[in-house]
Image (spheres, grey):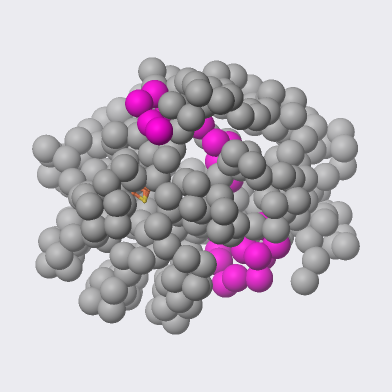
Amino acid sequence: MHDCSNRRWGEKRYHSMDYDLKQIYGEKVYKITLNGGMSCPNRDGTLGTGGCIFCSAQGSGDFAGCAHFSITEQLQAGKASLAGKRPIHSYIAYFQAFTNTYAPVGYLERIYMEAVQDPDVKILSIATRPDCLGKDVLNLLDKINQIKPVWIELGLQTIHPSTAAYIRRGYELPVFERAVNELRRRGIEVIVHTILCLPGETMDMILDTLNYLNRQDIQGIKLQLLHVLKGTDLAADYKASPFYIPSMEEYIELLARCIARIRPDITIHRLTGDGPKELLVMPLWTSNKRTVLNALHSYLKRMDIWQGKDYYD
Ligand code: SF4
């Protein structure tokens, strides 16, 4: 059990990405999603053709930019769409769609360098699979990380083999562990994606995944409620035999238990899903992210819960 220190992360009772970045850059850092035009071995036939069961045709990059435009053009478009808010000087260039290290290393170098050469880009964040980090790619990431911080986001989703097989993740846990070790040897920050409420997973199974991640050298985590998107095999399964999807109140209770279990130094980058409204089949209540987060914040306060309250070594 750890001491309660409600003010440790600013106004929040958890260690949020915004809090971290404000400490470092003195202001909010905005994310611009980019599309490097890559595919995924789980889609192009190398490992499979159907992709992960929940993955949309956009390769989990439903808000990413358009690959027909250069990285510089996508960055300009991203900045223009955020320009109404206030003067912004700091961005995260986020390669989101598909598997963003799955291309010849020369091509990767060109697009990553194009992003980090923008003076407003403070961080390069790259979503990928742990089985797409060969030595040449790791060395490239190491090189870019000397120029600007590189975050690697790994889609683990769960540690449970039965669920991993159902969602067609396509790699085993030791592959993930090797990737984390190789990235950390090079000083690169690792952010892990998890999906909550996958079919067949109990609360204890979710906590098992978090306990496991607490023991890994990871710096960030994304918690995402399972979203059923139109056109996916998951949507077909849901239609054939609906599985449990929590209400907003149930999800907030579940999320609070997860937050209490997460190691206090791990930065929480996401707490809910933000699937595109036009593709969302279930759960529809998630489309109002602000409502969900406000309800979570008041629940944490009311129940006196904070990140790491139930963490144990
Ligand atoms: S690894 Fe990512 S891009 Fe590839 S199928 Fe799975 S979710 Fe989609």
Residue 221 painted magenta: yes
Residue 189 painted magenta: no
User: Image quadrant of residue 78?
Assistant: top left
Q: State the image coordinates of residue 174 (x, y, percent, origin top left).
A: 49, 73
Residue, x 26% and y 71% (percent of image)?
137
Q: State the image coordinates of residue 38 (x, y, percent, origin top left).
A: 20, 50
Image quarter where the N terminus lies is bottom right
Please indicate whether residue 73 sits to the left or right of residue 238 in the image: left
Image quarter where the C terminus lies is bottom right
> How many labels were placed on the picture?
0
Residue, x 23% and y 76% (percent of image)?
136
Please indicate whether residue 196 sits to the left or right of residue 304 in the image: left
Q: Nearer the viewer, residue 8 or 191?
A: 191
The reply to whether residue 205 is in sight is yes
User: Image quadrant of residue 3?
Assistant: bottom right
Q: State the image coordinates of residue 181 (x, y, percent, origin top left).
A: 48, 77
Q: State the image coordinates of residue 161 (x, y, percent, origin top left).
A: 56, 58
User: Up-down: is 174 above or below 21?
Assistant: below
Q: Nearer the viewer, residue 260 or 57?
A: 57
User: Up-down: is 248 above or below 167?
Assistant: above
Q: Magenta residues, as a range?
A: 210-233
